[in-house]
Image (cartoon, coloured by chain):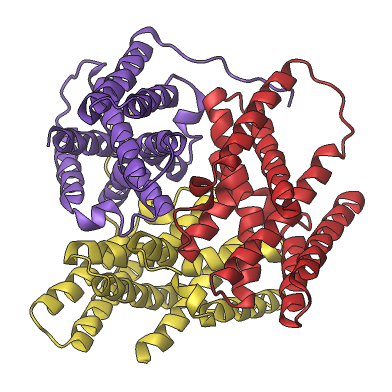
Chain colours: A purple, B yellow, C red
Amino acid sequence: MLIYILDMFGTAVFAASGVLLAGRLRMDPFGVVVLASVTAIGGGTIRDMALGATPVFWITDTNYLWVIFVTCFLAMLAVRRPRRMPWYFLPVADAIGLAVFVAIGVEKALRFGASPMVAVIMGVITGCGGGVIRDVLAREIPMVLRTEVYATACILGGIIHTVGLSFDVDPAVATLAGIITTLTIRLAAIRWHLSLPTLALRG
Amino acid sequence: MLIYILDMFGTAVFAASGVLLAGRLRMDPFGVVVLASVTAIGGGTIRDMALGATPVFWITDTNYLWVIFVTCFLAMLAVRRPRRMPWYFLPVADAIGLAVFVAIGVEKALRFGASPMVAVIMGVITGCGGGVIRDVLAREIPMVLRTEVYATACILGGIIHTVGLSFDVDPAVATLAGIITTLTIRLAAIRWHLSLPTLALRG
Amino acid sequence: MLIYILDMFGTAVFAASGVLLAGRLRMDPFGVVVLASVTAIGGGTIRDMALGATPVFWITDTNYLWVIFVTCFLAMLAVRRPRRMPWYFLPVADAIGLAVFVAIGVEKALRFGASPMVAVIMGVITGCGGGVIRDVLAREIPMVLRTEVYATACILGGIIHTVGLSFDVDPAVATLAGIITTLTIRLAAIRWHLSLPTLALRG
């Protein structure tokens, strides 16, 4: 239940990040909703299609769509009278959503019989896939592929989660440990601007 | 039956729009066929994958592929001796195809047990998805996300269609009402260059 | 069995091409793995989603993922001490992988009841789909859509393969004939820089 609430929170935060990018690109209201939607549910959709968990999750539970629509509506209203938010507000909210999405992806994959390694990958896809589609539609090289310890946080969180389960830790505890791992690493990366060294090849 | 013929017509028109873009990008014949195909059947393919309606529609009914191939062949021939077409020819043909695709998407989603809201979304995906993939492959920000009352026409057409069905209107009448709604709004947008106000955020 | 080994070889080669592009774009290690993965298994994933062959192949057989990980690891090591490779090494390896992927796509599609034409298309998607996603993520117009006899080789190889089967040729022979066709045409295109004429439209 708590996970479900956090899931909706993550959906709203991810949708908001889509709205922000759509605004920067001067999209019309429909473009805003599309970019918000693919960011919020794109990763889970790819996961469900690959697992064969169809119809995909937002078809069977339309709460996700309502959360996205309301978020878009509020965000478009909020744009007119911008208020100062502390700079870390959005990244921290995004980190919470990311950590929850990864845990949900891991659990769904395991429920569909995936091996632990595949479950971690599905966690990463659930967390990062939406942002990748958002960036592709906005014609940017996906942020997650370039810098910052973003996907790496997901991978480590997913590993803690699955390793916990394989040691017969209580599922709720394993899930929580995974979420905290992803969140902590991501917050540390935001706070100290951590990034992995990039691979440089001679062009 | 009429719907099926219109569906094939829409497939041909959408394929032609892919051919046109491929020509502008100086693609080779294979690129032409790929861009024509993703434009014509991309939206329906995403819809079927999300619904779990697999194998997707063009695998079980190969008429769609034949229509695309013939369209590409004729379009490549036609390119050599360009004739003057009235400027509104392609947009109007595209609007007809769009309206039919939306109706087909709505119906298929309902047949697979989707709620009316999801059915409208599936209608929009069926109508607009192919153009989005086409534009992504051609490295443009999807036209449908930026301007013109394109997706909005699909949404309103889909709503009329599903609302009609929920009031127990005869299915054929509801379908027709949806198609006419999409088509009328789209034609009006073409005629008077309507577009929704865009959302502007401070970058 | 030989096919399976060649499949793993193709996976490694395709992954390496993703690593190379990621290196040129100065991606971090995670970006490298993602770009390598989508190149190596992206085409087969789309094929399996469209056929309804879920969970997709790399979920049920994780050897593909291990091959990709090891390839990335070795390639990132190799980057530090670049050695001279003959210029044709990568294109030829890529051609072998391509030919095998096409044959595997054709066979899987037929096994799922697809018609010969759809089977050829699934072969092309298996061979070329990963490279298209790779290029989209890297914000390039997909190489395969622009020049060189790349997809054309896949189409002809797939046709030979399915025509062979429809004439009741021994399946192994038909598969081999298809692979050799794709490979020969592709190698000839590399050797003599063959390309199809591009379609030029008045913008």
Residue A107 horizontal side relative to residue C71, left or right: left
In the image, residue A188 above or below residue C15: above
Q: Residue at x 69, y 64 (%)?
A: B30
In which quadrant is the C terminus of chain A drawn? top right
Q: Is residue A133 above or below residue C50?
A: above
Query: Residue B196 location in percent, x, y?
Result: 26, 54
Q: Which one is in front, C106 or B137? A: C106
Residue B87 visible within the image: no
Residue A126 position within the rendered picture, expressed as x and y whole percent measured from the top left: 36, 39
Which quarter of the figure has residue A152?
top left
Q: Residue at x 77, y 76 (%)?
A: C164
* Farthest-out residue, right: C192
Left or right relative to C138: residue B10:
left
Position of residue B143 in the picture relative to residue C182 (left or right): left
Q: How many marks?
A: 0
Residue A143 % position (x, y): 45, 29
Displayed quadrant of residue B72: bottom right
Q: Nearer the viewer, residue B8 or C83?
A: C83
* Nearer to the camera, B14 or B57: B57
**Residue at point 71% right, 46% down?**
C10
Residue farthest to the front? A168
Considering every residue shown, the one lying at the far bottom of the view is B1
Q: Nearer the viewer, residue C21 or B11?
A: C21
Residue depicted at x 57% and y 25%: C27
Q: Is residue A176 visible?
A: yes
Tell which residue pokes out farthest to the left in this image: B167
Query: Could you tell me residue B79's position as x and y percent?
Result: 67, 74
What is the quadrant of the N terminus of chain A in the image?
top left
Q: Quadrant of residue A164?
A: top left
